[in-house]
Image (cartoon, helix red, strand yellow):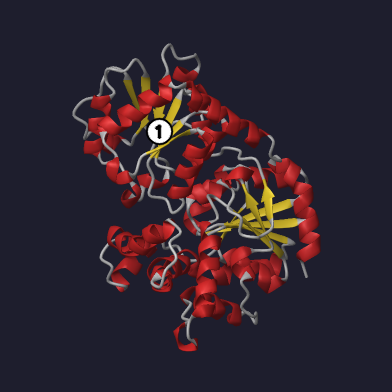
Amino acid sequence: MRVLFTSFPGRTHFFNSVPLAWALCAAGHEVRVASGPELVDAITRSGLTAVPVGSAETLKEKTQRVMEEKEYGSVERWQALASAPQHRLAGGRADSSEWADLSRLYDLAITPGASLMNDSMIDDMVAFSRWWGPDLVLWDAASYAGAVAAAAVGAAHGRVLYAHDTDTEMRARLLRLKAEQPPGDRRDSLQEWMTGWAGKYGLEFSEELFTGHFTVDQLPPSFRIDTGLHYLSMRYVPYNGPAVQPEWLWSTPAVPRVLMTFGLSVRDWSHQQVMSVGRLQDTLDAVADLDIELVVTLQEELRDQLSRIPPNTRIVGFVPLQCIVPSCSVAIHQGSPGGFNISLLYGVPQLMFSIAPDAHLKSRHLHRTGAGLAIAPAEVTGTAIRDALVRLLEDRAFRDGAHGVRQEILGQPSPGDLVPKLARLAAAHRR
């Protein structure tokens, strides 16, 4: 079987699929990974074969260009414009203004984001697929270029989720509300964008271009949103690039170890950074008297802006999460898929403050399972973090809750277990 993985050039999105790609290779299947040229090095360093598609313009350059063309001013400004309806909708509100809010969210954020991440790759991806002939295309859930390429060559295709399936949930709400509107007021900017690309290759528009034939979900089954789609449960396996186990992690810590990590994506995208240097300094000062070993992942230029580093704090530029999280008593993070999922996998209580689209769901699940705590980004202070951290360290119920989620995860199929199922689905859906 020939399997094509596709991802827009975002490292963390690609990393999310690497263990499944390895499993398919190990089972004897041919695997290729198509993405923008800027991701080629990350793909090849993972041991997989890269297929560069699209322009050499980086994702960051594209984003800046779109900001200027649409006169948003900056990524931060764009995010602020789009987040107002998104935050209102996160609570599940349904009233007369919901259609207007959803339409605005699609017009300002979802459709421009889909276009920005996919447009430059689609032609090349279809051309490669027509030559190589994949049987199955597995696409990162934001990388619709993979769905178009699969449909163009009759391949089976499925999404690989990196977080909760909020896009499908929101799309279902939009379609329901759209059907209730007068015929002249049913604008669907995302459908219009996809219809244009589908028509270019002689395809009819279908919602399947947004959902795939099936979806691989790496969250614990009890965390899943019920959208009525076909989900394949797969155990999360951590991968965050080439890894080296540092020597200081070769022994058990003498005091509770606490990790504070801001993830890989925020290194290049400052608007995703919830904690400013000032807030970080306030946090370090607030926990300086605790009998802990606080490990903070922080790039050098931000470390240099700190006024003080307490004796109980170690600043590191990068440490592989799978190397450090198992030794931690608490993990503090910004709600990235890596930080959230790896803490669940190893049964480590977590403290999250996040602006991610599914932050409300992650917070709800942490509360329901007792696996951790969440602080709203606007309420992040040194005192708030200290209070939550002390609770997580002292109350054994959080360790029990985190352990319960870990047991659920260990019961999920491994990437290797999923391979025969993918082969059957490919045979069933390919034309």
Q: Identify whether 297 is placed above or below 126.
A: above
Query: Where residue 241 sits in the image (x, y, percent)?
Result: 52, 40
Quadrant of the drawing holding the C terminus: bottom right
Q: Which residue is mark 1?
A: 332
Which is nearer the eye, 222 or 125? 222
Quadrant of the drawing holding the N terminus: bottom right
Residue depicted at 37% across the width and 63% down the height: 63
Query: Where residue 5 sits in the image (x, y, percent)?
Result: 63, 56
Please say whether residue 384 is visible from this viewpoint. yes
Q: Identify whether 324 is placed above or below 305.
A: above
Q: Give the farthest residue toward the front.
A: 95
Q: Residues within 10 Å of mark 1 (few under 14, many from 20)?
A: many
Q: Give the farthest residue toward the bottom.
A: 184
Please say whether residue 121 is visible from this viewpoint. no
Query: Where residue 240 sits in the image (x, y, percent)?
Result: 52, 39
Which is nearer the eye, 220 or 68? 220
Q: Give the farthest residue toward the top.
A: 254
Q: Identify whether 102 is placed above or below 79.
A: below
Which is nearer the eye, 147 or 65? 147
Residue depicted at 33% across the width and 36% down the height: 299
* Residue 104 falls left or right of residue 15: left
Dividing the picture into quadrants, the one containing residue 211 is bottom right
* Residue 401 falls left or right of residue 429: left
Identify residue type, mark 1. Ile
Q: Give the farthest residue toward the left.
A: 307
* Residue 323 falls left or right of residue 291: right
Q: Secondary structure at mark 1?
A: strand
Dividing the picture into quadrants, the one containing residue 416 is top right
Query: Where residue 120 sits in the image (x, y, percent)?
Result: 49, 69
